[in-house]
Image (spheres, helix red, strand yellow):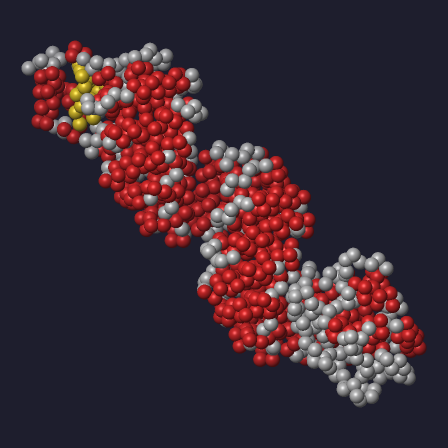
Amino acid sequence: MDKRSAGISGNYTRSGNDYNQPNNHAPSSGLGRYRHATVRPWDNPPRTVPGRNEFYHSSGTRSSQHLQCRSVNPAEDFNALITQEIMADLLSKSDHFGHRYNGKNHSQFANSIKEYTSAAKRPLNRAEQSQLIRMLQNFIPTRSWNWRSLTTTIHSLTSAGVFTPHYPMDERVKPTQAHLLSTLLDAIIFNCSQKPQARNIDARGIANLLWAMAKLVDKGQKQTPEFNEAVVALLPHVSAMKDQFKAQGIANLLWAMAKLVDNGLEPTPGLNEAVVALLPHVNAQKDQFKAQGIANLLWAMAKLVDNGLERTPGLKEALAALLPLVNVQKNQLNTQGIANLLWAMAKLVDNELERIPGLQEAVAALLPLLDAQKNRLNAQNIANLLWAMAKLVDNGLEQTPGLKEAVAALLPHVNAQKNQFIPQGIANLLWAMAKLVENTQQQTPGLNEATAALLPLVNAQREHFIPQHIANLLWAIAKLVDNGLEQTPELNEAVIALLPLVHAQKNQLNAQSIANLLWAITKLVNNGQEWTAEFNAAVAALLPLVNAQKNQLNALGIAKLLWAMAKLVDIGQEQTPELNEAVAALLPYVNAQKDQFNAQHVANLLWVMAKLVDNGLEQTPGLNEALVALLPRVNKQKDQFNVRDIANLLWAMAKLVDNEQKPTPGLNEAVATLLPHVKVQQANFKPQDISNLLWAMAKLVDNRYKQTPEFNEAVATLLTCVIGQKANFNPQEIANLLWAMAKLVDNGQEQTPGLNVAAAELLHRVNAQEDQFIAQHVANLLWATAKLGELIELNLATSACESLVYRISENLKFSREEISMSLWGVMVCCARLALDSNANKNNVLEKHMDDLLSRLKNTSPYDEEDQSTMIMASSWLGRACPVVRHYQTAISKTQADFRNQLQSCMPSLKIEEEKSLNSLPPVDLLLPDHNMVIEVQGPSHYVGGDFKTRKGSTLLKIALLKKSGFEVIEIPVNRLWHQDVMKPFIDQIKKRTNSQ
């Protein structure tokens, strides 16, 4: 989330500027009530003492007694305060004294309005404000007003809500309101430009004015150049008078500065100096702060840190001084204070200040208070508190029982107050729910109900969401769906409502929002959302922004964006020029930020590059440089990878190798680093992880990766996992696993009990799920079952084959390669049945063989494998074959030695070598006069090189030769190591050729 996405908004954060009033009235903190933070103008005496309620001595006679010693009763009619007589009297005083008028009576009038709102416990409503403003047309502050009148007037009017914008605003009110504020600001600027002694500028007045100005901004007042000039004029006085501020003044000043910065005031040198001047006084006066002051100070510091002032001298020391006070004064905190404090701590943690002493203890002290205060929380408190807890958990806070109880206590209030949430609250709450789910809070009672209550509000409030809300909402919905949330109609409507806003507000999106949006859109589509025109338009709007804002992306953003683009391509979206340009723009930043990527980023990025290459991305220098930069990180971060990371990394490396990725420095080393982790993490692998890992092992070996002891141990570990989770694999995983086992066997993997059992267990699952296999699965399964040969018991292999060819008959769409693989697999099954004299011959399989051969003939072009398959099928079926295959031949030393020995023992025997019969693959030795073939079988003809369990290709060749009328003698090479052991085979040949 963006730093400003989940804070305490101005509508809810209170300054606590509660200088004692004569009536000791304390500020209110209830939901929707006016928070009146008052100023004690100066030390007013008891009103029973005549004449002491005047602020200043005046040269004029005292008049208008209704303004002197005035105290407003809550029930008193507002109209009594703003009579024509009172307003005329104010004008008379101003006119009478002219440039010598010090503003005393005007400030008393302003104070009376403030007292009215204080007694009413609310600001002026729209009607009262309009009525008052019309009466203030001649209420004109001047530069002649003294400091006390000025500070009292502006603070009182601000506190009463005189300048608060009401919507719709009465057009007759605006000019008077603007003029009144302008003249007050002008007087402030003038006073501040004079020597403090000449204008009686004091610390309390500075604090009250800055608080009032922060309040003005907080209530929606625009920061005009004049407004900013007034703030800048006040700030140097903070530094100059730093030793005169009391504890509450310090709290109010830091709150005010934080609020001004949070509303867009540029952190000028003057502001920074003022903050730096005040921070040491936080530590010095720490024992004087009340609970509300502590809450406001920590809120202010969190806001300052969140706006880039985290390195301000004295900040950490001030925080360290305040945090222990939270526990000390926790029982004096009101609801707002608790909410503000937890929000502040979450912000501090989010800005990497979690190591400040006392922070975690302060959080632990506050959490139990929430249950007792839960019924007093307003809507924004709830939103901020759940956001804070999600942030704390996301930054590593232990999920203690106290935290879980606090979350559980808050969630029911989301539904209860759902109609009170503003757009920012809705966005923050859904973000928080998603983060809690992501961090294993999915079992919290009430979380799904709270989410369901919020989703309809997204559509209802869609016109009011700013760009960051849109990004956070789509991210949250995608994250919730990715963690199992049901895609209800309300959820789908929320997505539909948000997508058009992406395009409409694209130019206001920051880099992080762009990354989150593309990630979210991809996740939603990947989890079953239909790719509509709205999705397409949103992606098309976002992709060009990647290049434009690439310099603003952090490591996480780069990783998210590249993942999203790879996933979009993987789920079938077109590789548009804009997408390719975005990828090309990001790749150099992988190298530039390589040291910032954590373990998961490294795993995801390597997965991304493998996916992009696998989907046809050109292997550019940028891609290769990114790979070279990332691979050494695998070894450096090997202990931080989780189960899914290990699976993704090995899968990615296998894919890169399989796509003819040129030898990349560090790739083999990275694989070797990861292999031992397979055994360590075996208990945590999910079915998909097991399937991907075994597939990766097979691909690596198929591309000449050395089968080291660590490699073999990883394979053996995974086979055990296959057996243990046999019932949990889906059709694709079953197909991939059997394909991988066949590939491993085909590349010389040693035979283990686990291999045999795992293959058998998976084949039993084929019959159970036969109607769920797609064409590619069918082809891979037929091919794999055939490749494994005699490792699979004949009845089991036949049963699986019959189930799979049934799927072929259902007119599945097969590619040329899939037809060829299926045809070869069916042939091997037929060959095994033919070689077993006890087996029942299956004409149905031959019928399917005939059909597949016809389909293969109708596809083109053919590669050499296809040609061999067509030749063998034609031979089996007794058909003419339209293609001719030219085979490369090679004579092994063992074969040559045996041939020579045989010829020396039988000089007249005609022997031919590497002869192709009926266009079939060449035989080792042919005795043409006796229709006899001798096959010298090396270890590659047997599963695991055991010289007992023949592979499918070996069985097919023998069956084809026998079907063509040849007698076949198989001689394992392990029986031909020297001449003495050759003799029994030579004697056998003599006997069969009647040459004895």
Across and down, in percent, residue 377 comes to 60, 65
Instruction: Give the answer, above or below, for where 89 lies relative to 604.
Output: below
Q: Position of residue 373 (x, y in %)?
A: 57, 69
Residue 401 is left or right of residue 790, and the answer is right
Q: Residue at x 52, y 53 (%)?
A: 448
Above or below, 121 against 175 in this view is: below
Q: Residue furthest left?
A: 996
Residue drawn where x is 40% and y is 18% of the image: 855
Q: Nearer the viewer, residue 329 or 581?
A: 329
> In percent of the image, x 80 and y 58: which residue is there?
169
Can you see residue 834?
yes
Residue located at (31% from left, 35% from top): 764
Between residues 116 and 45, which one lies in front from this camera angle?
116
**986 on left or right of 938:** left
Query: Split into 4 quadrants, where in the image is the N terminus?
Result: bottom right
Q: Is residue 746 above or below residue 676?
A: above
x and y, in percent, of residue 80 in the image: 85, 74
Q: Which quadrant is the C terminus positioned in?
A: top left
